[in-house]
Amino acid sequence: MRIRRCCVVTLVSLASLLPATLASAQPPANDQPDVSTRDDATPPAYKLAKGGLATSVADLTLTRDGVEVPIRVRFPTNAPGPVPLVLFSHGMGGSFDSFSNLTEHWASHGYVVILPTHADSIKRQREQGRDPRDFARDPEAYRARVDLVGRVDDLKAILDSLATIEEKIPALRTLDAKPLIDRESIGVAGHSAGAFTAQLCVDVKVRTRSALRGERIGDPRIDAAIIISGQGTTSRNLMEDSWKGVTRPMLVIAGSKDVSGVGNETPESRRHPYELSPSGDKYLLFIEGATHSSYQGKDGEGRRAMLVASEKPTTDIAIIADAVAAQTLAFLDAYLKGDAAAKDYLARDHVRAIDKAIHAEHK
């Protein structure tokens, strides 16, 4: 995987994982109260039911510097006013089919979600005549094809093309026919390689091979980030001070069995984006028993990835998916919609009420 001409970094695909022995890890040291002892006043999980807005999906292709960027747009069709935008970046080898249940959930609660299919997608590699079995034959070589800067450029191209996207999808309008996307409320989310992509978007500093210096390639239009199964200092591109300048709100999601057959990330290093970033609007959701691909729940791509990788979550996958859905939507509502109740939900770590396997911190 490269950052332009940089060294290979440690990432893993959500859709193309190899069979591997997944190592267990000890749970985080922070103590969490058992749900059975909590006060009955603890609120239920945040907005787990489908939202009240009807949704639709449209696919189209953008062009960036002569390169095609296929995108999928999920959006509410009966929103009374403009709604925030969330960009979602898939893992290595994946596609815009990733996290379909979660992104549909967001859309039903009033978000436009745009998911690109990056150049490292197995689907796109197949279309270009490459053998999709290359990943299984040599995953490290396949990983070297992942261009992180190119991924960030894909997301920037989407932001540069919002007017074009709205023109090509006439349904992207409010009830009074105004543009649906609120340009002043934009978030980014990603899983695995997409988590690295999302981190770069909010100014996580990377170290390059050609020059041992920090480099930031973020986009100021992005207001907040969700990092699902991200990277820490086990990556040669990241240092302990890589997160020092991250001042935007960030939610980090990891699990105690989140390892893979490719790369050297550990459950502990997945926590680094939270632990090494400065205090202020930072959140950690840590799920005991969650594996690398389990955060998607039972949607198609997530299930296939778990089967291929022989992942065995030790917490019910429905509980994992509920925790991710609740915490991510609360985070988006708090920081893209300014919802005080959502921010209070986050500040009180109420997501822990879902199950005793759910741990949460904030700072």
Image (cartoon, rainbow, N blue to C red):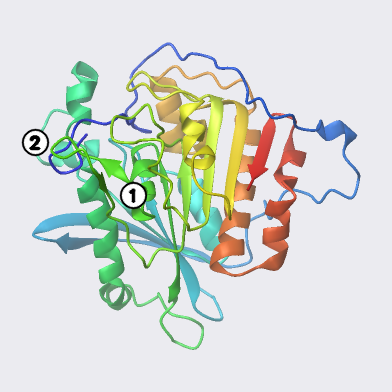
238 above or below 134?
Answer: below
Residue marked by disc 1? 200
Q: Please tell me how crowded label 2 is: few (under 14), some (14-19), or many (20+) other residues with Cα within 10 Å.
A: few
Residue 130 placement, left or right of 287: left
State the residue at coordinates (28%, 64%). 158
Residue marked by disc 2? 129
State the residue at coordinates (12%, 40%). 5
Element on which disc 1 rests = helix
86 above or below 178?
Answer: above
State the residue at coordinates (16%, 62%). 63
Element on which disc 2 rests = loop
Which of 319/189 is in front? 189
Disc nearer the start of the sequence (2/1): 2
Q: Comparing marks 2 and 1, which lies closer to the viewer?
A: 1
Residue 279 position, x and y percent, is: 57, 50
The amino acid type found where label 1 is placed reads Leu
- Give the residue furthest to the top: 21
- Give the residue furthest to the bottom: 176
Residue 300 placement, left or right of 354: left
The amino acid type found where label 2 is placed reads Gly
Q: Residue 68 — which label?
A: none
